[in-house]
Amino acid sequence: MDDIDVLLPRHAFDLINARLGEGRVVAVNGARQAGKTALLRMVHRHSGGTLSTFDDASTVEAARRDPFGFVTGFPYPHLIDEIQRGGDPVLHARLMHLRGMA
């Protein structure tokens, strides 16, 4: 457990974990610097799966080349941080839609 987990408990943590058990897509949004990435890291440590970030240009390119493979080719849950950095709203919609179909 990181110090941030102790200092700033994430009240959304239990809700996100519950939602991951109910469906395939959970969106986490909020103001800048609100702790979304820290929250996703906590969920990843607890639930396993895959944590990808669109801060990495090669990750964005992989999602563009093969959106279906990107969302289905990793262990569930596949947590995607900074999805807005993909730059293509159609890609965002496709990833979310495909994840629902996977």
Image (cartoon, grey):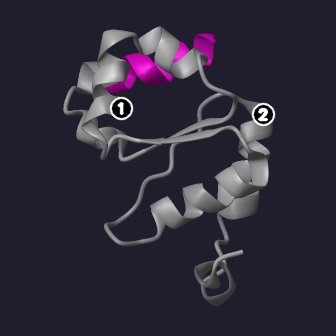
Calculate the distance from the C-alpha at mark 1 to the C-alpha at mark 2.
Answer: 27 Å
> What residue span does the magenta drawing correspond to?
92-102
Which residue sits at x=59%, y=16%? 72
Q: What's the residue type where badge 2 is placed?
A: Glu
Percent position of residue 31, x then y:
34, 66
Percent position of residue 81, x then y:
44, 47
Q: Is residue 79 above or below residue 10?
A: above
Q: Is residue 65 above or below residue 35?
A: above
Q: Is residue 69 left or right of residue 84?
A: right
| Of pointers 1 and 2, the one earlier in the residue sequence | 2
Does 63 appear in magenta? no
Q: Is residue 89 left or right of residue 24?
A: left
Give the label, 1 or 2, closer to the camera: 1
Does 100 appear in magenta? yes
- Callout 1: SS: helix
Which residue sits at x=59%, y=58%? 41
Q: Which residue is mark 2?
A: 22
Residue 45 image-quadrant placement:
bottom right
Which part of the image, by quadrant, shows the C terminus? top right
Query: Label 2: few (<14), some or many (≥20) within 10 Å?
Result: few
Which part of the image, by quadrant, shows the N terminus? bottom right
- Callout 2: SS: helix
Percent position of residue 21, x then y:
80, 37
Dominant secondary structure (helix, strand or loop) of the stretch shown in magenta? helix
Q: Which mark is residue 59?
A: 1
Q: Is residue 84 above or below residue 9?
A: above
Which residue sits at x=36%, y=39%? 83
